[in-house]
Image (cartoon, helix red, strand yellow):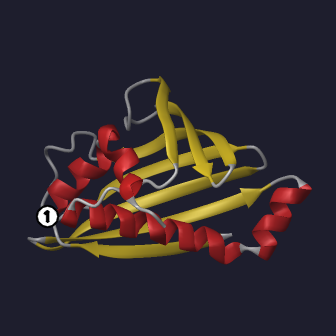
């Protein structure tokens, strides 16, 4: 299964990239985030592997995330015409996914965030979930982007949400 979602954020690309890359902000916009800890390397850097734990309702999901691409490596020196790439592979019980994020400057004050996600499932139960509920994965990705946008534009923290 593969899909692409996108969102425009009313902030300059350099600011969006800095906020997106900062691990301190993850719980504020990434709904269900329980833990994101590097097992080796530095958070967000190429080759770093992290343990990630997410809570969805009563279910905790644990997986391993590996950063497979980060360009440019130094986020303080982004070329004006360049594209910022964040890519990672995520492996959990019964699933593998690759997420390829691209951030481009729409205008000096706005950023376009495009995210392509690919899932592969193993095991009967996960394959069944992938077949019966493919829209749920896209919807969750779009929700994460909307939550990030609300966080950076309005200071909204998902941990304060009551829904």
- Expressed as whole percent of the image width and height from the top left, the position of residue 6 reads 40, 74
Task: Name the residue nearer the viewer: 27 or 107.
Answer: 27
Which quadrant of the structure image shows residue 118? bottom right
Residue 147 appears in the figure = yes
Q: In the picture shown, does residue 84 fall above or below 108?
A: above
Q: Quadrant of residue 57?
A: bottom right
Residue at which label 1 appears:
12
Front one among 76 and 145: 145
Q: Is residue 101 left or right of residue 82?
A: right
In the shown orientation, is residue 57 left or right of residue 156? right
Whole-percent x and y of residue 66?
A: 53, 38
Secondary structure of the residue carrying tag 1 is loop
Q: Is residue 42 above or below residue 91?
A: above
- 13 or 144, which lies in front? 144
91 up-or-down from 80: above or below = above
Residue 21 location (% of width, % of height): 30, 45
Horizontal and vertical percent position of residue 90:
60, 46
Quadrant holding the N terminus: bottom right
């Amino acid at each position: 299964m593969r899909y692409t979602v996108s969102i425009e954020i009313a902030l300059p690309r350099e600011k969006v990239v800095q906020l997106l890359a900062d691990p301190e902000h993850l719980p504020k916009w990434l709904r269900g985030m329980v833990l994101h800890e590097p097992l080796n390397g530095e958070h967000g850097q190429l080759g770093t592997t992290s343990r990630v734990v997410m809570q969805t309702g009563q279910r905790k999901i644990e997986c391993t995330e590996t950063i497979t691409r980060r360009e440019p490596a130094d986020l303080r020196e982004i070329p004006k015409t360049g594209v910022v790439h964040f890519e990672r592979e995520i492996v959990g019980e019964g699933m593998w996914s690759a997420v390829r994020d691209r951030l481009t400057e729409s205008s000096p004050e706005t950023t376009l965030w495009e995210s392509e996600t690919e899932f592969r499932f193993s095991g009967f139960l996960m394959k069944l979930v992938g077949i019966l509920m493919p829209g749920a994965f896209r919807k969750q990705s779009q929700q994460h982007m909307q939550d990030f946008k609300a966080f950076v534009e309005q200071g909204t923290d998902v941990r304060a949400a009551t829904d």
